[in-house]
Amino acid sequence: MKLIVGLGNPGEAYADSRHNIGFKVVRALVACAKAVLKRDRGTFSLSCREKIGAEEVILALPLTFMNLSGVAVKDLARKYKIKIDDLLVVCDCMDLEFGRLKLRPGGSAAGQRGLQSIIESLGTQDFARLRVGIGRPSGSRDAADYVLTAFNRKERSGLREVLEEAASCCESWVTKGITETMNTFNRSKKNE
C-alpha cells in the first residue's frame, strides 16, 4: 500500500492559495477516481482508499495547518503501516517557475515548512516529494504573504493542465517507480 499526501492549509480562506497546490493535486487524483474524501479517524486528515494500477493507495489531505503537517502524516503512516519508500508528499515550491514539477526521492525541506514538519515527525528526510512550482514573488514582496495569495489570471488559465500533469506524475510514481517517473516529469518547461 502507498500513501500520497497533498499539503496545504484547511479552510475556505486558503482554498485557492498557492500554498494549497498540494491539496489541489490530490483532489485531482480523487476526482479522477470518482472517490470521496472522508474524515480519517485518528489521523487529523481527510482520506480515501483507491487503486492506481494494481496498487492500493491512500490519498490524504491533512487537516492540520501546513506547519504541523508532520503530525497528520506520521499518524497516517502508522495507521496504514506505510513504509517510508511508499510515501509521496505533494507540495508547493517557490524555487520552481509556475507549473514546473520536480520529483525527488528525499532531501532537505528547502524552506518548505510542511516538509520540515514531516521530516521532524518521521525522523527522516528519505521520503519522496513532488514539488509543484508556484514561482517567486516579484520585487520585495514577502514570501509568507505571497504563498497565501491566489493565482493570477494567467496562472489560473494554465492551472488545470498543471494539476493534470502533477496527478499523472503521482500515478506514474505508483505504477512505474520513482526513477522512471523522475526521468519523465523532471524537465524544464522551456525544454519541452
Image (cartoon, rainbow, N blue to C red):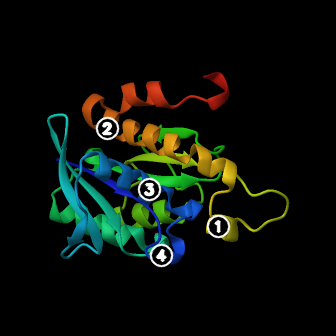
Residue 9 picture location, percent across and down: 47, 71
The x and y percentages for residue 129 are 43, 47
Report the quarter where the C terminus lies.
top right
Chain-order first, disc 4 or disc 3:
4
Of the residues shown, which amino acid type is indicated by label 3?
A: Lys
| Residue type marked 1 | Thr
Q: CA distance from mark 3 to mark 2?
A: 15 Å
Cβ atoms at labels 1 and 3 below 8 Å apart: no
Distance from the alpha carbon under mark 1 to that under mark 3: 15 Å
| Badge 3: residue crowd in 10 Å (few <14, some 14–19, many ≥20) | many
Q: CA distance from mark 1 to mark 4?
A: 13 Å
Vertical side of 118 occupied by 58: above or below: above
Q: Secondary structure at mark 4?
A: helix
Disc 1 or 4, which lies upstream in sequence? Answer: 4
Look at the numbered disc 3 and give the secondary structure of its residue.
helix
- Vertical arrangement, residue 137 with respect to residue 157, above or below: below
Check disc 2 and report the residue beneath it.
171
Q: What percent of the width, then of the height, locates residue 81?
A: 15, 57
Q: Are marks 2 and 1 in contact (CB under 8 Å)?
A: no
- How far across and how far down the image is residue 188, in percent? 62, 30
Q: Classify 10 Å Cα crowding around label 1: few (below 14), some (14-19), many (20 and above).
A: some
Residue with the mark numbered 4: 12
Q: Residue at x 58, y 39 (%)?
A: 100
Q: Residue at x 18, y 49 (%)?
A: 50
* Among numbered discs 1 and 3, the one appearing first in the sequence: 3
For badge 2, the amino acid type reads: Glu
Mark nearer the N terminus (2 vs 4): 4
**Closer to the eye: label 3 or 2:** 3
Mark with earlier residue (3, 2): 3
Question: Is the C-beta separation of discs 4 and 3 under 8 Å?
Answer: no
Q: In which quarter of the view is residue 74 placed?
A: bottom left
Residue to which mark 1 is pinned: 149
